[in-house]
Image: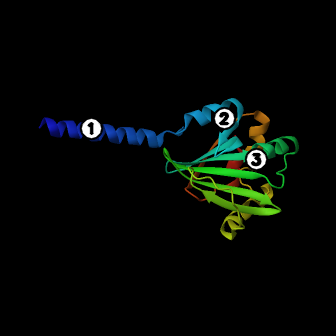
Amino acid sequence: MKTRTLLLTSLILMAFVTIWSCSNNEIDPDPEVNAMSRDSLNVSRYSRGWVHYAQVTKNGNYFRRMFIDSGSAAVVSNTAEIPNEALFAMETWFGHEQSTVFIRQRNSQWQSGSFSPGNPSYSVATQNSCNSCHSRAASTDFTFTKPLLVKALQKRQVQFVQCNQDSFNPCDLSVYLGN
């Protein structure tokens, strides 16, 4: 009887913690990166210097963390234009587990690639599936989060937005305008 009561209490507690963590909009599996980013935007990830400019939280305990290479961030900060050779990285997270890092680079045209967090690779190629989806963001240079990037650089603060889409479905473009 005591074992059943203990087991039932444990299950209820685990369910409560799971419900609480899934309903918490401040998913922060890597508080060190977010703390550093809130202070300066500049972070070192995957053997490179980046500017962390946005986090897009989506339905299902899923979010994306956006970065641009430091040199390109300086150009965007001065001109609000994304330069040729700009490199973006998008970390994908499911709860507290990091998944793939997607990259996009402008080499006269947009090219894409991906790697696992523990094995960075910056090779990119033209990928029609990526480009066809990003065609929806033609007004923002085929980069959904350009408005968040410009705002983050102006305010010197990472931009956090919430989207009602699941997983890999892009948010409505108005979400990327930020608050």
Q: Residue at x 73, y 63 (%)?
A: 111
Q: Give x and y (percent) for residue 42.
A: 71, 36
Q: Amino acid at mark 3?
A: Pro
Q: Give x and y (percent) for residue 156.
A: 75, 33
**Residue at the top extreme of this rendering:** 39
Q: Nearer the viewer, mark 3 or mark 2?
A: 2
* Among the two numbered marks 3 and 2 on one chain, the one whose residue lies closer to the N terminus: 2
Crowding near pointer 1: few (<14 within 10 Å), some, many (20+)?
few
Q: Amino acid at mark 2?
A: Ser
**Which residue is label 3 attached to?**
147
Separation of marks 3 and 2 at Cα, in angstroms:
18 Å
**Which residue is label 2 attached to?**
37
* Among the two numbered marks 1 and 2 on one chain, the one whose residue lies closer to the N terminus: 1
Based on the displayed image, in which of its 4 quarters is residue 124 positioned? bottom right
**Residue at the right extreme of this rendering:** 79
Position of the N terminus, as image quadrant, is: top left
**Residue at the bottom extreme of this rendering:** 128
Q: Residue at x 84, y 46 (%)?
A: 80
Crowding near pointer 2: few (<14 within 10 Å), some, many (20+)?
some
Separation of marks 3 and 1 at Cα, in angstroms:
45 Å
* Among the two numbered marks 3 and 1 on one chain, the one whose residue lies closer to the N terminus: 1
Separation of marks 1 and 2 at Cα, in angstroms:
37 Å
Left or right: residue 44 versus residue 25 is: right
In this rendering, does residue 136 appear at all? Answer: yes
Based on the displayed image, in which of its 4 quarters is residue 168 positioned? bottom right
**Which residue is label 1 attached to?**
10
SS for dot 2: helix
Crowding near pointer 3: few (<14 within 10 Å), some, many (20+)?
some
Residue toward you, 28 or 43: 43
Left or right: residue 77 versus residue 90 is: right
Q: Amino acid at mark 1?
A: Ser
